[in-house]
Image (cartoon, helix red, strand yellow):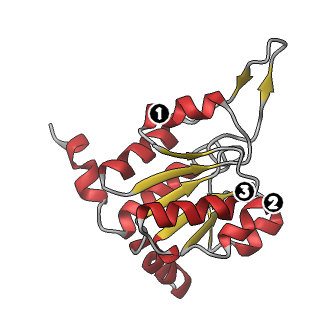
């Protein structure tokens, strides 16, 4: 393991909370609007399963997004995510609220984002992660850039990385390997 990977792993070991942006992270950034005020978003099933594995391992999950969408509320409920902050135009306000509510320190938080609106949080958290197709400006502030694209497995990649770094991978996947 090189020095950068070792440093990322050390940061990941401290993570107690993963905060996720939505559009461009949990989705590919597409927003489909029909003529009847319905909004459609596409979520990757493996990202959802990764989130479920983190929750099972005791890592908390939150969603912080600038837009409001009933689809996001529904997906969060399906995944068991209770900390959902929508219409957050200053995402650091939500971060401060979450830190206080969950009694966590900034270095115990990992955040996945994809655009310049995520930079203020990137500058504060212990592990700032940009998806592969993030804006270049966001990537400049990220500690880690995923191989996967937003809405196409990047969140699962982060979940797996956190579980492995924290030494939880084998216990989480053990039940799937039993015959």
**Which residue ends up furthest to the bottom in the rendered image?**
3
- What residue is pinned by disc 2? 135
The residue that label 3 is drawn on is 114
- Image position of 49 (left or right of 19): left
- Could you tell which of marks 2 and 1 lies nearer the N-terminus? 1
Judge by depth and name the residue closer to the eye, 149 or 34: 34
Give the percent coordinates (x, y) of residue 123: 67, 76
- Looking at the rendered image, the disc whose residue lies closer to the viewer, 3 or 1, is 1
**Residue 152 vertical position relative to residue 16 in the rendered view, above or below:** above
Q: Secondary structure at mark 1?
A: helix
Q: Which mark is residue 77?
A: 1
- Horizontal side of 165 relative to 11 (left or right) equals left
How many C-alpha atoms fall within 10 Å of the one at disc 2: few (<14), some, or many (≥20)? Answer: some
Element class at badge 2:
loop
Residue 137: where, in percent of width, then height?
82, 68
**Quadrant location of the C terminus?**
top left
Name the spot of residue 66 as percent of width and height, x first: 73, 48
Contact check, label 3 and label 2, Cβ < 8 Å:
yes
Name the mark on residue 164.
none
Comes first in the chain, label 3 or label 2: 3
State which mark lies toward you, 2 or 1: 1
SS category of the residue bearing label 3: loop
Residue depicted at x 44% and y 46% = 51
Instruction: Tell me the distance, in whole angstroms, between the alpha carbons under discs 3 and 2.
Output: 6 Å
């Amino acid at each position: 393991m090189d020095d950068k990977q070792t440093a990322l792993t050390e940061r990941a070991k401290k993570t107690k909370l993963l905060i996720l942006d939505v559009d461009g992270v949990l989705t590919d950034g597409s927003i489909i609007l029909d003529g009847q005020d319905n909004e459609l978003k596409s979520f990757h099933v493996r990202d959802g399963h990764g989130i479920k594995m983190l929750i099972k391992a005791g890592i908390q999950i939150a969603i912080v997004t600038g837009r409001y969408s009933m689809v996001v509320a529904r997906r969060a409920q399906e995944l068991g995510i209770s900390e959902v902050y929508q219409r957050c135009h200053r995402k650091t306000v939500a971060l401060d609220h979450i830190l206080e509510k969950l009694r966590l320190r900034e270095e115990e938080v990992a955040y996945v984002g994809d655009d310049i609106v995520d930079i203020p949080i990137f500058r504060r958290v212990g592990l700032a992660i940009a998806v592969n197709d993030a804006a270049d400006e966001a990537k400049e502030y990220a500690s880690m850039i995923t191989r996967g694209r937003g809405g196409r497995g990047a969140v699962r990649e982060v979940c797996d990385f956190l579980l492995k770094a924290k030494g939880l991978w084998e216990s989480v996947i053990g039940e799937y390997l039993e015959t």
